[in-house]
Image (tube, rainbow, N blue to C red):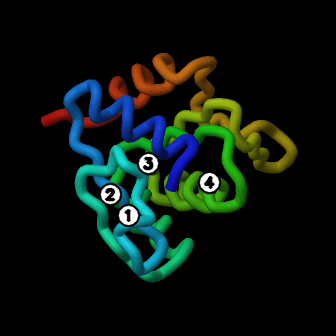
Amino acid sequence: MGGVMAAACKGAGEAGGLTIGILPGDNRREANPYVQIPIVSGVGYARNVAVVKSAQAVIAIDGSYGTLTEIGYALQSGIPVIGLKTWSLSIDGKADKNIILAENPKEAVDKAMSLINTD
């Protein structure tokens, strides 16, 4: 799980955070080198439900259909979504205002942190 996820885990780890990777396959070696706790699911994209339900906010960056499902699960569950160069969705032909847009990674993290319960 490289690319955006590796960069996110690297940044989180460097900032003192704990990184957990819920992996789609059966092999913990699929985790990027910055995942501190790999969780092997063996359920493919169905793991996206666990990823979203474990979050207080979701930052969607770029992405393909897996990212789109995570956005959908988050919105359906009332979990805030911050979008950074990702899918644009509409409801009845109007932009979905439930996706909070960010211009850069720092802004995305700042917006997410302002929305979560840190207790």
The residue lying at 40 percent from left, 20 percent from top is 110
Marks 3 and 4 close (CB-CB < 8 Å): no
Residue that mark 3 sits on:
79
Marks 1 and 2 close (CB-CB < 8 Å): yes
The residue lying at 63 percent from left, 61 percent from top is 66
Q: Picture coordinates of residue 60 (x, y %)?
A: 57, 42
Residue that mark 2 sits on:
54
Residue that mark 4 sits on:
67
Q: Earlier in the sequence, mark 3 or mark 2?
A: 2
Closer to viewer: mark 3 or mark 1: 1
Q: CA distance from mark 3 to mark 1?
A: 18 Å
Question: Amino acid under label 3?
Answer: Ile
The residue lying at 28 percent from left, 34 percent from top is 13
Closer to viewer: mark 4 or mark 1: 1
Q: Picture coordinates of residue 74 (x, y %)?
A: 50, 54
**Few, some or many C-alpha atoms within 10 Å of disc 3 (few <14, some 14-19, many ≥20)?**
many
Question: Amino acid under label 2?
Answer: Ser
Q: Earlier in the sequence, mark 4 or mark 1?
A: 1
Above or below 117: residue 34: below
Q: Residue 93's image quarter? A: top right
Question: Amino acid under label 4?
Answer: Thr
Q: Earlier in the sequence, mark 3 or mark 1?
A: 1
* 99 or 68: nearer the viewer: 68
Q: Picture coordinates of residue 45 (x, y %)?
A: 56, 72
* 24 or 55: nearer the viewer: 24
Question: Amino acid under label 1?
Answer: Ile
